Image (tube, rainbow, N blue to C red):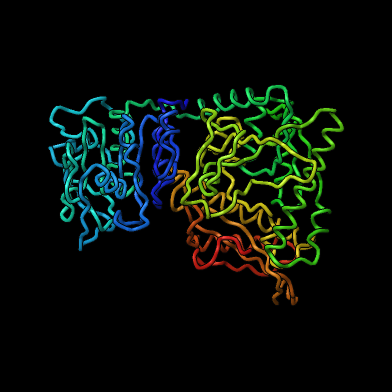
Amino acid sequence: MSNNNQRVIVVDFGAQYGQLIARRVRDLHVYSELVPHDVNVQELRANPPAAIILSGGPASVYAEDAPALNPALLEMGVPVLGFCYGMQAMAQALGGEVAHTDIAEYGPAELTVLGNAVLTDAAPNSASHTSSHPTPHTASLLFCETPTTQTVWMSHRDSVGRLPKGFVATASTPTTPIAAMECASRKLYATQFHPEVHHTSYGNIMLAHFLFDVAKLEPNWTMSNIADATIAAVRKQVGTERVILGLSGGVDSSVVAALLAKAIGKQLTCVFVNHGLLRKGEPEEVEEIFAGANSNFDVDFVHVHAEEQFLAGLARIKEPERKRQIIGSTFWKVFFHEAEKIKQRTGEEVKYLAQGTIYPDVIESGVSRSGAVSAADGSAATGSKQAATIKSHHNLIPFPKGVHFDLIEPLRNLFKDEVRALGTSLGLPDSLVHRQPFPGPGLAVRIIGEVTFEKLQPLKDADAIVREEIDAYNETLFEQTGVRDSERAVWQYFAVLPDIRSVGVMGDERTYERPIILRAVESRDAMTADWARLPHELLARISSRIVAEVNGINRVAYDITSKPPGTIEWE
């Protein structure tokens, strides 16, 4: 598991690839954290990492407000690897020169490795690691087992013009004579290109050499280790106290529930507030998983039926942001009421509130709160100051007067894909672990206009058909490609009920009923998305089934808007 000798920090200079670097390191089963460029070096010395990676960044090192590299990071005695801006900052900090150039490099470039580092049968981006030492003819550990000529991904204008003392150039491109440099005796390495992106053909091999040959790390960031360490950390913090969890049925809160069930059993109370806005069959699935006869989780499960309360609060409300506010405030009102009932029923104070905060939340909010158990080693995960203004922490809930809980956030060091993998290892079904993204306000923001029971029922029925048909389509793609997250698979898909009616003909009679709008997109991270090019026969089958099987629907339309300019959700 992660410890002082098994932690890599990624120093963020504002790179668009900052999180990606941390992800690539974790993909190689090494724990990594993203920290701001002005991280407190004194604190780092007290808890030193095993290695440091300097990210790229959008600024020029000569810009007045350019983020500066603290030279002390290079003097900690641990291996350092810089990318792009990180290479330039390293060179500048150590007495080298960064040159302004008239010719920029953006996109793929042909790299020539200097020093005959040739093993041309290496597989591009393979994470395998076959040797602890370079072959005798290899000049650079970083480029060992990669071909002399290879494709890399560039994104820069400035570049290193004069090497710092003690460094040698290890690679070049036609426009960048010093495309990589190193001082092997001090374990300082840098590349002008980006090994973390998949466009750099042998990037994963380079990262593996840095982590395992240079830094001598072990690939021990695994789901079993994560689960074991987190369970031990929760038990240590909680002791004999009681914990409450707001279980939404989403991936994050469900994984927290499964994790805490393993750790503290009946000390955990899962409160499932059913607001009536979930998809068809989901409330029953959640209850079956955590409280059914065949459940693997021995926890105190409370199913609160608050459907009428939520619908009453949403009556005559059409503005989407107001819907969200009402749903959020009503949820916590119901939740805290149930917490008080638990106290009255058991006679015990509930000390802890568990939440499904994950690492991107921490990074984007730039906050780190004490008292939260982290998934890896009990340390508090750090965020990025560069990202502090993106959004406020989505799980930071203002407690009502007289109510206070200490927080437990066991997933706060994990990325989403790691959360899913952890859920699988804990025994959660694939239908829950790999469910597509679903908004917190549920179907309320997929009903345009006022939310009523009469609108909810046909939307649930239509959405169930959409999911059934596209689930089967995605499964077919998986069988054909062998890859579950194939770029050709549909990433998110659902039905929308607009606040309009249209004329139709059914059974030789005129109808005047509602349409359903089908939304299906391809995406990797929801930051951008493109509409899915679904086969016409699949669209026809979805349309025919909805019109035939769902009462009150006489038309199906397909939204072919990308993000941007549109959004994935309609509200």
- Position of 11 with respect to 229 (left or right) is left
- Which quarter of the figure is the C terminus placed in? bottom right
The residue at the point 26 percent across, 58 percent down is 157
Which one is nearer the viewer's eye here, 183 or 204? Answer: 183
Number of numbered discs: 0
Image position, residue 32 (x, y; %): 43, 36
Can I make out residue 314 in this image?
yes
- Position of 490 with respect to 454 (left or right) is left
The residue at the point 47 percent across, 25 percent down is 1
The residue at the point 34 percent across, 37 percent down is 73
Which one is nearer the viewer's eye here, 162 or 492? Answer: 162
Image position, residue 551 (x, y; %): 75, 63
Can I make out residue 547 in this image?
no
Compared to 144, does 537 lie above or below? below
Image position, residue 464 (x, y; %): 66, 53
Compared to 323, does 474 lie above or below? above
Quarter-of-image position of residue 47: top left
Image position, residue 492 (x, y; %): 55, 54
Which one is nearer the viewer's eye here, 299 or 560? Answer: 299
Quarter-of-image position of residue 169: top left
Compared to 321, does 417 lie above or below? above
